[in-house]
Amino acid sequence: MSDKIRELLENTPEVVNVGLELFARAMREQGGHVHSVEWKPPLVEPNKQALALFNDPTIAAANQEAVTRMMRAQPVIIGVARARDVIPGMSDRTFLHAGPPIDWQHASGPLRGALIGAMLFEEFANTPEEAVRKLESGFVELAPNHEHNAVGPMAGVISPSMPVYIAVNAAGENRAYTNFNEGIGKVMRMGAYAPEVIDRLRWMSRVLAPLIGQALQRSGGIDLRNIIAQALQMGDECHNRNKAATSLFYREIAPYLVECDAPASNIAAVLRFIHSNDHFFVNLAMVAAKVMADAAHGIPGSSLVTTLSRNGTEFGIRISGLGDRWFIGPANVPRGLYFPGFGPDDANPDIGDSAITETAGFGGFALAGAPAIVQFIGGTPADAVRATLEMYEITVAEHEVFRIPSLDFRGTPVGIDLRAVIRSGILPVIDTGIAHREPGIGQVGAGIVRPPVRCFTEAYRTFEQQYLVQRGALPTSQTRRTI
Amino acid sequence: MVVRVHVEPNAYFDSVALMAVAAAVNREPGVELAALLMGTSPNLELLRDSGMWDACLEEVSPNDLVIAVRASDEVTATAAIEQVLQRLRATTPVRQPVDTSAVPRTLRSALRAAPQARIVAISVPGPYAPIEAEEALRSGRHVFLFSDNVPLSEEVRLKRLAQDLGLLLMGPDCGTAFISGLGLGFMNAVRRGPIGIVAAAGTGLQQVASLVDWFGSGISHGIGTGGRDLDEHVGGVTMLAGIDALAADSATEVLILVSKPPAPQVAQRVLQHAAQCGKPVVVCFVGRPPEPIENVRIAGNLTEAARLAVHLATGRPLEDLELPGHDELAARLAAQRAALRPGQRFLRGLYSGGTLCDEAMQILAPRIGDIRSNVPLRADLRLTDPHRSQEHTFVDLGSDEFTVGRPHPMIDQTIRIERLLREATDPTVAGIVLDVVLGYGAAADPAADLAPAIQEARRSAEREGRSLPVIVALVGTRSDPQDYERQRRALEAAGAIVVPSNAWAAELAAQLVA
């Protein structure tokens, strides 16, 4: 007989109770020590033949491998280039955008506005009307940032001649790209395309980006993971609050900027621009997260979520072990606080690649460390702590580098396991900006949003099918038909 | 409509704090728009665009707080600004430190929070139960799996896994266990003692354990296996592990094995295992006693199993191990029998425990003939409609066909009371047998519901000139939380004959129609 059974019969056992609370009460009545689980049914009823996938050690090992790659990826920003010159698979007529694939017809207001802005910026059109006509006629090819190793906040539009940051994984092979943050108010990422918006973009590509590029070259690269790790201990969660991270980045880059061979007025303008924008770092936080998430993508058998992203109409996710396929559901409208004069009726459905931060274990997952923004989720620091604690229920690991002081420096929850989402019904929490539903108006607030359930149930069905095929429980032909 | 702008110089507030205050002030009557912003250029632009510009804003720096209010009149606007300032200056009341001890929402986090927990008790719906059970086993925990409707293939897979990991998987469909003094599922408050039980039947375990307690001895452990453990596909994995565990357990001196009749080759393996375990073993395969085998005592029913085990454990002679009050009850029943009319020829059994129902039918069938049931002894005796009795009928009201969407009769008497009152109107009924199972997890006061119904049933028969004997097998101990004696008195006051043994209840019932 096993030692474990012998041990069981030696002392009154402590019990974890999953299911009817009646039984937990009955044991407590006898003086038993019982831990209750607040169990809820899974989001889907799993195929009876596939129940083993939820505890399959090979999947757990694949997820561990994936999350380790995610945590140990070391994103370093090394320079700046023209999008067309560095982003893989981008043509002179490619416009990249946030979220899963979408066409002009289905694009929401802010995305349409940003696409019009990019047409004007690229001088593919001289007026917004001309831009719309050309976009309707398929003048440019639209493609998701995520399919080109890139990310962009809100509409996330990157057009061929825009400047982009280049981030490399110093602990791996992959690279990622992102655009520059324009500041707040009327900005293209929120769908604005007025002349001053385009003028600012031109200044950014003429003055700001080249100078930052030079400074980065002089610096030999700036480690983004370090900045994020520090900022998470300074009240940022690096999605909706980037004050500390922007300041840290500013401190890193400033000396190298000053050393650049450029008129002092330009250098001062660049420094002022960074200083005046608390969200300057968000694009860098995102590109860091993209480097981390891509490092974890493509591990066979892994159920780790490696993309959470929205295009303003639909929410899409991708899974490490399910290739480049998107699983899609209708985007929700965030719940949150609004700027003066705006309210929920003005809000566009969830938009942007910025949920890559949650994918990589910060953003909404690190809310416990960002007490200054907890009012978005309805109140107190205790709510923020609860939000983070809830995410531990659906993640594979606790982050080795990102830690939260108020949780005794516990690592942030990192690596969303599709299976855990399905089993617990707990959806990832994302704290995000809210764009106006009409193009050209800009950000109207910020708040909390969750992905639609459908992304996860569809991904699960595909994962389940693949699992059954691999175990020989289903013929391959059947999968071809259904996948 | 007026616009009033107030500037607080050098007063930094986080934008989220400002938005929260603005949201509150915007709800004030008469306030059309209240904007709270730090004086940065994009913010000032926003104010200009919304028509809330004021000359004083020309001088504002990014470290100044701007409060701009558009309201119906001067007084409202000024009051709103004042309210903003008050709210911003107000200190928050001291709160308790942040509570981070949330109730776990998943088994994984519960196990992480309680590394010392040894057993996971699972009662989630069957289709999901294997997921929880497998996680528990892989984390090194023993499992008590109450859930039913678990696919047989999953049971086989999980029991093999448990075996490989050296763990006990009790269930699926395991109603009862008793481990080192702690009852899991539905279990009675029994004394600890030298008798260990391995049972493939929940109410069977409860009956045996309660009677051991009645006979003055006690239980070391009660290991449940789930109803299908002795199925040929499962092969008795848990029962064999349970025998080994109790054989090695120093507190256990005598073993009792309880099951419905197993698959023959499994029965063989279990008996051989029992014979070689090194301790006396009493085997009760309800209804089909196996061929005698050396070192193993065979009991015909659950009551007999308890008696034999107590005899073996304590050395008390079998004839001393009788339940009290036999003669008095027999006399009362004889009087009721004498009052029956000639047409009253059939028995009805309304059970909450499947094993107890089975045991009653096994005892009665040889004496009274065929008994129809939803859980029949022979396939041809299956009731066409389980809700309608025919001749002798015993039903397990805890079966799915009765409990879908309704509480189990162990917890709530509604299903049983409806049926009882219906049976009372049938002029061919000579007597009704019920089981009432007490203990932890069971209804808090079953007699409170059942006694009035028994009284009503008997009265309605009397109104039609019939006597209606009701016999209750009250399974439990005097330490059970429901108070055994109070339950017994209430049921007797309603006219029922109450005994602690189901076998005895069946034997008494047989006399009504013999």
Image: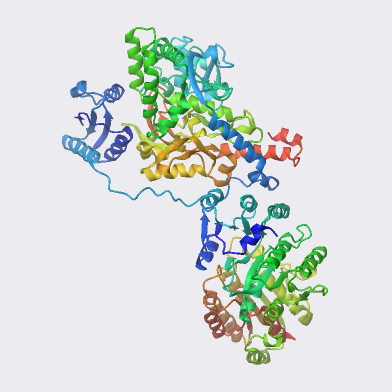
Q: Quadrant of residue B376?
A: bottom right
Up-down relation of residue A328 to residue B97 (above or below):
above
On-image quarter of the N terminus of chain B = top left
Up-down relation of residue B58 to residue A58 (above or below):
above
Q: Position of residue B463 (x, y in %)?
A: 59, 86
Q: How is the image coloured?
A: rainbow
How many labels sit on residues? Answer: 0
A447 to the left or right of B131: left
On-image quarter of the C terminus of chain B = bottom right
B196 to the left or right of B59: right
Q: Is residue A333 visible?
A: no
Up-down relation of residue A306 to residue A55 (above or below):
above
Q: Nearer the viewer, residue A1 or B512?
A: A1
Up-down relation of residue B155 to residue B307 (above or below):
above
Q: Position of residue A277 (x, y in %)?
A: 35, 23
B444 to the left or right of B177: left
The residue at 49%/17% (across/down) is A78
The residue at 58%/85% (across/down) is B495
Q: Position of residue A200 (x, y in %)?
A: 38, 14
Q: Is residue A210 visible?
A: yes
Q: Nearer the viewer, residue B170 or B398?
A: B170
A149 to the left or right of B90: right
Q: Position of residue A410 (x, y in %)?
A: 46, 41
